Image: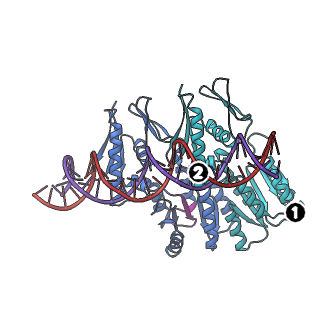
Chain colours: A blue, B cyan, C red, D purple
Amino acid sequence: MTADQKKILIVEDDFNFGNILKDYLILNDYFVVLAKNGIEGMDKFQKEDFDLCILDVMMPFKDGFTLGKEIREKNENIPFFFLSAKTLKEDVLKGFKIGADDYLSKPFDSEVLLAKIKAVLNRKNFYNAPESDIYEFEIGKFKFNSKLRYLSFDEEDPIKLSPKENQLLRLLVLNINDLLPREIALNKIWRDHNYFTSRSMDVYIAKLRKYLKLDSGVEILNIHGEGFRLVVKN
Amino acid sequence: MTADQKKILIVEDDFNFGNILKDYLILNDYFVVLAKNGIEGMDKFQKEDFDLCILDVMMPFKDGFTLGKEIREKNENIPFFFLSAKTLKEDVLKGFKIGADDYLSKPFDSEVLLAKIKAVLNRKNFYNAPESDIYEFEIGKFKFNSKLRYLSFDEEDPIKLSPKENQLLRLLVLNINDLLPREIALNKIWRDHNYFTSRSMDVYIAKLRKYLKLDSGVEILNIHGEGFRLVVKN
DNA sequence: GTATTTATTAACAATACATTAAGCCTTAGA
DNA sequence: TCTAAGGCTTAATGTATTGTTAATAAATAC
């Protein structure tokens, strides 16, 4: 996927319909991930990083409403649509109450859907990261501000972090002393995991290690085949 | 109106319908202003500060689409809905193209409307704080008056600021030590963000930096790809 | 011991930013 | 009416930052 492509999660148990929708959105230059039930949907949502979710309401195991509620708990700002054959007022209201941005009744016009997707994604949502409220961290003797993208050791000359350095360090800190699985980081930051993104991540780990050398009590350990671990000794 | 009440502008030429809608929203604890045509609507929009606009599409003199377009030009972020008896696909698409957040067909369910209003208003919109009458600031050793547009270092020879310099410095000060996202500044000051307005902004940043050099404890830092930060060391 | 995974540095192209200068309006005032 | 000044945009040019890939070395697993 390209960097400016928006990433959409579709959760739809109807295989045919789901795929048609997926293809249609791909055709319109979105990057699409299709999950075929609520469980899988939640799993993908947690591992990857989406700009929009489109949730079918009626699904076995875990219905769309439940899924929507869980998604909203994890991320306060991500927009999502409900998709349903039911147009019962109570359902529509329930959808909005959960925090949906729209409730679409099947069948719906594909161009209208596209317009609505654009409307939602075009909304300037500068502070839309779920975690965006949390951006000040301490890492040993360092102070790390992921909003302003700096890492300072002794107040004086803060190291400016690039967006990728920043995101990676942030994920490491959020899992401090714990494993940050490689795949999770790749999906969240690079939105894709393959040979090249993986090499790229290694490069960034090396960069961060260089910065963090100032405090010998801080280090990034590798867990072979698993991921990385930011360790702080005190 | 109370401080936490949201302010909604309704533009609707049907006197009866407009008033019913207004009363209904007031009943639901919104502060509502009703304009009875596009001209009046634009006038009210420019004079007051709203959280949401609800525009009827078919109106004499100035139709809702035109009005919506003008509103969007004035304010990139304010949400608005279109209201129409027409459900023609082209109209719906046109509405979204203009930048609407929703397109409601009459008759619509009032509870659903309420749900949609809530959905839109719950979205965070930080930078839409009303242009308050705060205009005297201290920036390190400088005094800055954004009403009189001057910046003085030692009482003596105040630097006269041009309107653009003034607006930009004001935005920076309002976010002192914090990030001022590029796009926010462009939308607020230049009302458009593209290559040229962005270059223009850079020119103004350079101008401000030149002025601010008098106090070495004050500087404008860039956060690559994000925006600028006015930093004051003490 | 060999294949796989990780580490580190460097080269590179693509953007983003910085700064000065030039041009083009608009407006105040001769 | 003409001119000068101010304000803003665009151009021109240079510098910095960023992310990917390559190249090479080291560590780890089986």
Q: Quadrant of residue A206?
A: top left
**Chain ID for label 2?**
B
> Which residue sits at x=53%, y=28%?
B216
Q: Quadrant of the C terminus of chain A?
A: top left
Number of marks in the rendered image: 2
**In 3D space, how far apart are the residues under numbered discs 1 and 2 (Cα atoms)?**
43 Å
Magenta residues (range) = A50-64
**Horizontal side of residue B195 vs A208, given as left or right:** right
Discs 1 and 2 lie in a common subunit: yes
| Circle 2 crowding by C-alpha within 10 Å: few under 14, some 14–19, many from 20 | some
A59, above or below D18, in the image:
below
Instruction: Tell which of B149 and B234 is nearer to you.
Output: B149
| Residue under pointer 2 | B198
Look at label 1 and name its amino acid: Asp
| Circle 1 crowding by C-alpha within 10 Å: few under 14, some 14–19, many from 20 | few
Residue B122 appearing in the image: no
**Chain ID for label 1?**
B
* Residue D13 in picture, x, y percent from top left: 48, 50
